[in-house]
Amino acid sequence: MKPRKQRLDNLLNLLCTHNMGYYEFISKFSDIEELSGFMDVRDIDMWCALGLDIIKTEQNEIELLTRFRDISEQEICVVDIETSGGINTGQIIEIGAVKIKNSVEIGRFESFVSAPFVPENITELTGISTDDLVGAPSLSYVLEKFKLFLGTSLFVAHNVNFDYGFISQSLDQIGLGMLLNRKLCTIDLARRTIASEKYGLGSLKELLGINNLHHRALNDAIAAAEILKISLSRLPFSVQTTEDLIKFSKTAPSMKLKPEPVLV
């Protein structure tokens, strides 16, 4: 991880544990180049526009609302993207997302994204061809609409760092700023709540009886949302807030099963 990005993550992690005085907050974040060159760090509304769910309290402190929000009250956006290549060589060609609250779906987002070319191996994997993207909206249009849909929701995906990182970099490149939403990986959470030998999306779908097409953005987001719902139903009582959930997904004991020995 780049040192500046690591410092930003470290500062955001401080907000996960305690409120920060407003002027301390401004002082710590004002010299982070990725932010100071894009926004006025004193503008709380701008932080929220980037997905960070904070308020300025009557005590003149910055509070991260996910610290105290009950999981049942948290809006969760489960996201999946299809791309034409890696983060430095390709672009997003499809975004699908399902927004849920208290395990009930409250919204969906789905769109192709215009791209000049889709490699043959990507078409074989996803079924998306160059012809499918003819007339599709531009990347900047789709990302702007998606960002409005996402808001300050908890960003969830299966292998979240890929989807989150790809979308964040793409947003930043078109001038809309990086993502600062709190995030959670359904692979990590499933490891703590579902006994399985494997935690890939296909393996968990088979184990849990989730039947839909694979490697299309909305379908994969729906499948990840179903895995999330099952995991949420199996949480220990001690996990109450959104930040409790994020911490649990990273630190609770794994339930991964050892493969059955092969008898010769």
Image (tube, rainbow, N blue to C red):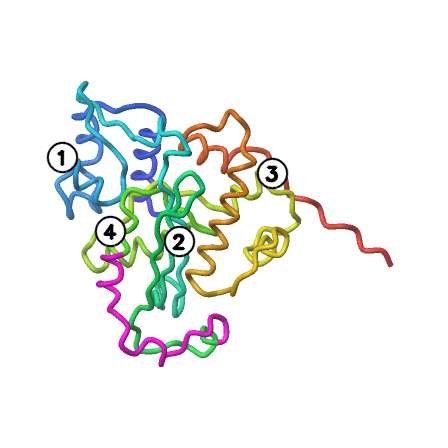
Task: Look at mark 2 in the image and give the residue it sits on.
Answer: 79
Q: SS at mark 4?
A: helix
How far is disc 3 from disc 2 in space, using C-alphas? 24 Å
Going by the numbered disc 4, the residue's amino acid type is Leu
Question: x, y percentage for residue 164?
Answer: 37, 51
Mark 3 or mark 2: name the one nearer the start of the chain. Answer: 2
Distance, label 3 to label 1, CA atoms, is 41 Å
Q: Kindly check if marks 1 and 2 are in contact, taking CB atoms under 8 A apart as contact.
A: no
Marks 4 and 3, the one that precedes in the sequence? 4
Magenta: predominant secondary structure element?
A: helix
**Mark 3 nearby-residue class (10 Å; few <14, some 14–19, many ≥20):** some
Circle 1 is placed at which residue position? 42
In the picture, measured across the screen, residue 151 lies left or right of residue 73, that is left
| C-alpha span from label 4 to label 1 | 21 Å
Q: Of all residues shown, which one is farthest toward the bottom?
A: 131
Is residue 10 shown left or right of residue 33?
Answer: right
In this rendering, which labeled residue sits more in front, label 3 or label 2?
2
